[in-house]
Amino acid sequence: MRSIKRRILAMFLGLMVLIVGLVFLINANFLEPFYIEYKQGEMIRLYEMFDTAQANGTITEADTQRKLFIESERANISATVMAQNGEILFYTEQEKRGPLYVQLFGYIADLNKAEQQENYGSYSIYRVKYNATGKEYLEIYGMLSDGSVFIMQSPLESIHDAALLTNRFLIYVSVPVMLVGILFVLFFSRRISKPIKELAELSKRMADLDFDAKYTSGGDDEIGVLGKNFNIMSQKLEKAISELKSANNQLQQDIEQKEKMENMRSEFLGNVSHELKTPIALIQGYAEGLKESVNDDAQSREFYCDVIIDEAAKMNQMVKNLLTLNQLEFGAEEPVMERFDVVSLMKGVLASCEILIQQADAVIDFIADEQMYVWADELKTEQVFRNYLVNALHHVANEKRIQIRATLGDNTVRISVFNSGNPIPEEDIDKIWQKFYKVDKAHTREYGGNGIGLSIVKAIMESMHQGYGVKNFDNGVEFWFELDAGT
């Protein structure tokens, strides 16, 4: 792979060689014509100064002479101006009638053979080469407005020397300049190629789904803007892939949930079938007995009817509990959080269960403050407490004592229901919250339990994101749950 640094270096060297070659070409072919054109302009300007001074009659004055001499020296021009009567009005040579004076008379007598460059009417420009010296000059000869004649001369030898010297200077200078230029290009090409390399590496890491890589070189130029766009693209790609993974994860959860629901449905049907089998068989048996008049006395028929009614009531209660549990487990009923007095709620439940308490011949110890406010769903909290209380009444034994306690902790209120009796076997502790699970099936059957009450408690407490549990004691069992304190 050809690097950008090498390409920039090759382009720079090619450009430098092209520029130096063009300078050589221009210097060799266009410097001399440009110089001659420039000298012609200088001579014409000096001619106009002569003509103006002569017209004003000031050409022989000292100030004018000094100005004309300075201009001639500056332009490297030799000049001689002669009046019609043969008087020398101005000259730059050491002698009035020097070589330039002789050259003037040669033009007047048309004795000089010269290559005429331009003819401007009152003066002509010539390019003259003297065989004796081999030197070449640019000369202008003509007449001023008043008829005075003049001649000006400027050597062309200097331009030849200048061209040769310039070419030689370019040879000497071009090598070190190119070396410095190479160092300069290497330095800046590195600064240019570094962020590009970083972008290339960044794109490679992004292709490997590594979005932690970021463009860090900065800058406000096109590369900097590209780097910023890379970072934005990286963030958006990371977000899109994250959302895609979340969607895939959700899809996987949905699949697992579907499988779980299918398993639950099968388990539910099996449990419900099992739970309904006994009451249905009892109802069917006693109904057939009534139909066939197994016992004709009124007392027996009343007993048969009571069994049928009792079993139907148990089935009805089980169906209600299953519907409630189903709504809780699938989030059909979101908890409504409100602030209320939980002590008042528990007292109300105890009052409504007074008949059950008397039937169980239980003693209730209620330990709580006069008022304790909590944040929770009031109806669901009542259901949890009622299930705990009914469960305690069904399993109370020995001294038949039930202790209900409400205690304030760190921003929480713990409510516990203890009943004296036999502890729950340790192997059953974690299973009692499962649907249809019964520790003592025979005893549960006696009071019509179906193993759903504690499952409802579990679903309610988890929907409110609160703690719950059970604790064994030597003389009984304590069920508890916690709520956020309202004070």
Image: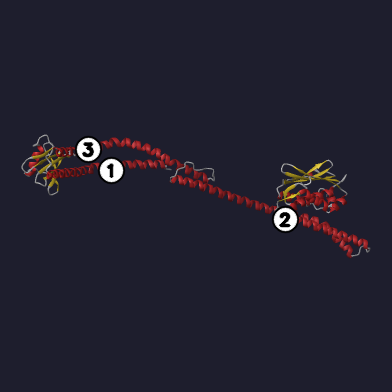
Name the front one of labels 1 and 3.
3
Of the numbered discs 1 and 2, the one sitting upstream in the chain is 1
In the drawing, what numbered circle is on residue 22?
1
In the rendering, at what x and y percent does residue 171 appear? 28, 36
Disc 1 packing (10 Å; few <14; some 14–19; many ≥20)? few
Is 261 placed left or right of 166 in the picture?
right
In the rendering, at what x and y percent does residue 163 appear? 22, 39
Of the numbered discs 3 and 2, the one sitting upstream in the chain is 3
Amino acid type at image mark 1: Leu
Is 185 placed left or right of 165 in the picture?
right
Amino acid type at image mark 2: Gln
Is 58 placed left or right of 393 in the picture?
left
Q: Is residue 446 visible?
A: no
Dot 3 falls on a residue whose secondary structure is helix
Dot 1 falls on a residue whose secondary structure is helix
Instruction: Identify the residue position indicated by label 3 in the image.
Output: 162
Q: Please identify the quarter of the rendering in which residue 294 is found.
A: bottom right
In the rendering, at what x and y percent does residue 417 appear? 80, 46
In which quadrant of the rendered image does the C terminus lie? top right
